[in-house]
Amino acid sequence: MDRRSVLRGQYAFAHEMLEGTIKKCPLELLTKSIEGSLTNPIGATYAHAVITEDLLLVRWLQNREPVFEEGNWGAKVGMELPQSAMVTPEWAKSVRFELEPMRAYAAAVRATVDGFIDRAPDSDLLSEVDFGPSKQPKLSVLGTLGVLHVSSHQGEMAALLGLKGITGQTV
């Protein structure tokens, strides 16, 4: 098994978990905040995970138009694409969207990123980009943002569902 296959498998699993968790979220909990907490609402966390992939793994790493703009997703999900993947408390508390169109947008982003991992030349995947405090191969950035970042937020969403008595983990 090569590194590309391993990354694609991890990427698929992380996203299956994310989608399994958001699928369990009642609509009334999407925008619910925990009073006195810095934790973002479940819906904002989900949107952030998806938008981060589109802005960083599609626009930045692939140097192409974000899936959101290519597919006119704003009209479908009922929100505008933020200019940054960084979440502010104000954005997290105010973001609203239609869940099923957002899930369809997430699937389009996943397909775009997975297709890139599958078909990009090794020379592109192994080329280094500035990421954090150092240069990293694109393959590493794809793993960090497409697997670790997504999994971290999925766990956060599952924990918030757990506070409401809903089993958020899918395994």
Image (cartoon, rainbow, N blue to C red):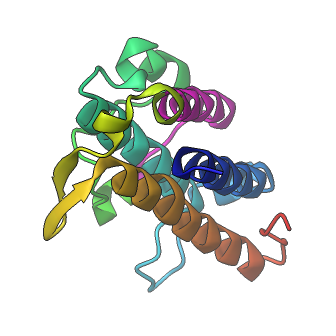
Instruction: Identify the magenta region.
Output: 93-115
Q: Position of residue 73 (x, y in %)?
A: 47, 20
Where is residue 108 shown, x and y percent of the image?
56, 26
- Residue located at (13% from left, 71% from top): 133
The answer to whether 98 appears left or right of 170 in the picture is: left
Which part of the image, by quadrant, shows the C terminus? bottom right
Residue drawn at x 67%, y 50% as measured from the top left? 9
- Answer above or below: position of 73 versus 127: above
Side (left or right) of 113 relative to 133 = right
In the image, farthest residue toward the bottom: 36
Residue 100 visible in the current orientation: yes
Residue 32 visible in the displayed image:
no
Q: Is residue 140 magenta?
A: no
On screen, residue 23 above or below 165: above
In reply to whether residue 105 is colored magenta, the answer given is yes
Q: Residue at x 46, y 57 (%)?
A: 143
Task: Please indicate whether residue 32 sits to the left or right of residue 121 in the image.
Answer: right
**x then y, percent, for residue 22:** 70, 52
Residue at (29% x, 35% y) in the render: 124
| Image: 126 above or below 77 | below
Where in the figure is residue 162, as x and y percent of width and height?
76, 78
- Foreground pick, 147 / 68: 147
Total labels: the figure holds 0
Q: Between residues 133 and 73, which one lies in front from this camera angle?
A: 133
How would you classify the magenta stretch by its main secondary structure?
helix
Q: Residue furthest front?
A: 1
